[in-house]
Image: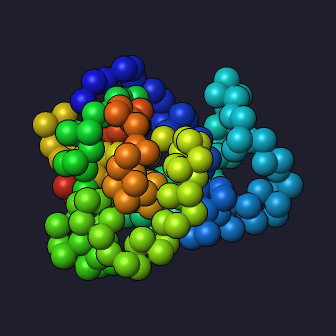
Amino acid sequence: MYIEKDITDDEMVATFLKGEIDSTSFGLCIRDGLEQDKKNREIVDEPNFLDTEENGYRKYLLGKCRGYGRNTFLFNNFPADIQWKRVILDKTDLSKVKYINCSNWSQWTGNSRLPLDGAKHSELINQCKELVETLKRGEKFFEIILVASNINDTPIILDGNHRMTAYFIEPQHAPEELRCIIGFSEKLNNWTFY
């Protein structure tokens, strides 16, 4: 893992929303939220990090849809002191990454939580069909967001489980190096999905 630079939580939040706004799982909540609040989708697609009101709204939206900053849903017991960084992972690093700790991802991997095992499960293969086709066309995904207690800990996928699975379903189309966001906190073991 090569650490490129520190980033703000504003950048992580914007990346998270970008990665989910068109997803079948959580995209509707984000799109509906924008519509209800009379906000243009541009606030997600083209974030202005110098605009504190925009940054605040994106955090509000991620909180509403996924529990960010509210200690609920995906972010239940999530550490407040997490430090975000932009990193580059090689294929060896990627082979160690794990899915979040929840029943579906554990079941689909025989409890290993490794995307390599998830990529062999028929239900996950079916869920990732469109993503795999995207890879085959040479298109790139939004950055995957990971978390770990420290640089030596096993990274866990916070956002991008299906995108990561697609890389393992079609490894010949996966990049040699993958730019990701990772958050570090020694309190991460308190997170519900650790």
User: Which of the 4 image quadrants contains residue 182?
Assistant: top left
Which residue is most to the right? 38
Residue 111, image x and y in percent? 17, 73
The answer to which of 1 and 183 lies nearer the viewer is 1
Residue 61 lies left or right of residue 96; in this view the side is right
Residue 107, image x and y in percent? 26, 79
Residue that appears at 69% across and 34% down: 47
Residue 84 lies left or right of residue 156; in this view the side is right
Tell me, yes or no, if residue 147 can be seen here.
yes
Residue that appears at 78% across and 48% down: 41
State which quarter of the image contains the N terminus. Answer: top left
Residue 153, image x and y in percent? 15, 43
Which residue is most to the top? 5
Residue that appears at 45% across and 27% down: 7
Tell me, yes or no, if residue 102 can be seen here.
no
Residue that appears at 27% across and 44% down: 94
State which quarter of the image contains the C terminus. Answer: bottom left
